[in-house]
Image: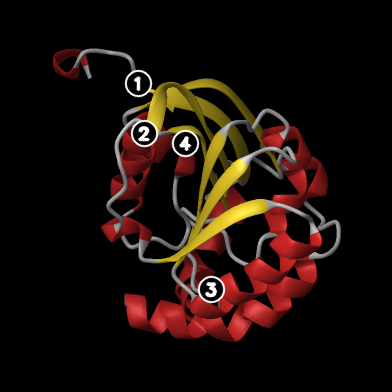
Amino acid sequence: MNIDQQKKLFNKQAKKYSKRARKKTPDHQWRQKLLSSANGKILEVSAGAGTNFQYYPKDASILAVDLSPAMIQHAKEVASETDSHVDFLVANVEELDLPENSFDTVVSTLSMCAYPNPERVLSLLATWCKDDGQVLLMEHGVSSNRIISKLQHVFDPLFNKRVGCHINRDIIKLIEASPLETSRIESALFDAVHLVWAKPDSRPLNDA
């Protein structure tokens, strides 16, 4: 699925995501746990319809980026309802040009499944985050359960076509290979969902 197809699909899904953003979703506890430490100048990539806005501090300054104009439109309404201070940008995250070392907190929730090049996105998140900042991730991927993982591989093409995401990516392996240093990882649902607390890797480049 190319970027234009993704944008069209996500525009179509925006209304459904908008309804979810206005209530506590099934993953509410995970989002609350992960985002409770978010602070300062926050960058949220693939922000969707603004589901995470309710979890950020009221004094936070947020830049919300999403590929879908329809998602951003709904997110603006949610930001107003939650009294959140948000600037919005419609953009392809993989092509986004933001200043390096400029955000205290960088957030991605359930978006690594959709990027054509998740390795590049993880590298960008590390670049945009301040050296003493944090990168907070909630992502789903291939399960450690052999039966579930086989089913994920079988149904991945269908999910990608219908929902716009891949369900069989090894998220932890992708993160370990990225310029991010994890301080904490919590997994659930047979290791298919991961909460990750990380920061830019402090190792010298020749040691990475």
Residue at left 58%, top 31%? 40
Q: Residues within 10 Å of mark 4 (few under 14, many from 20)?
A: some
Residue at left 63%, top 45%? 193
**Residue 39 left/right relative to 55:** left
Q: CA distance from mark 1 to mark 3?
A: 33 Å
Give amino acid for label 4: Ile
Foreground label between 1 and 3: 1
Asked which quadrant contains residue 59, the reply is top right
Q: Position of residue 22 (x, y in %)?
A: 82, 65
Q: Secondary structure at mark 1?
A: loop
Disc 1 to disc 2: CB gap under 8 Å: yes
Whichever of callouts 2 and 3 sits on the residue coming sooner in the sequence is 2
Q: CA distance from mark 1 to mark 4?
A: 15 Å
Give amino acid for label 1: Asp
Whichever of callouts 4 and 3 sits on the residue coming sooner in the sequence is 3
Asked which quadrant contains residue 13, the reply is bottom right
Q: Decide which of 86, 95 is in the foreground and name it.
A: 86
Residue at left 49%, top 75%? 68
Q: Which residue is mark 3?
A: 159
Query: Can you say which quadrant of the picture contains the C terminus?
Result: top left
Q: Secondary structure at mark 3?
A: helix
Q: Position of residue 104 (x, y in %)?
A: 50, 30
Q: Which residue is mark 2?
A: 126
Q: Secondary structure at mark 4?
A: helix
Q: CA distance from mark 2 to mark 3?
A: 28 Å
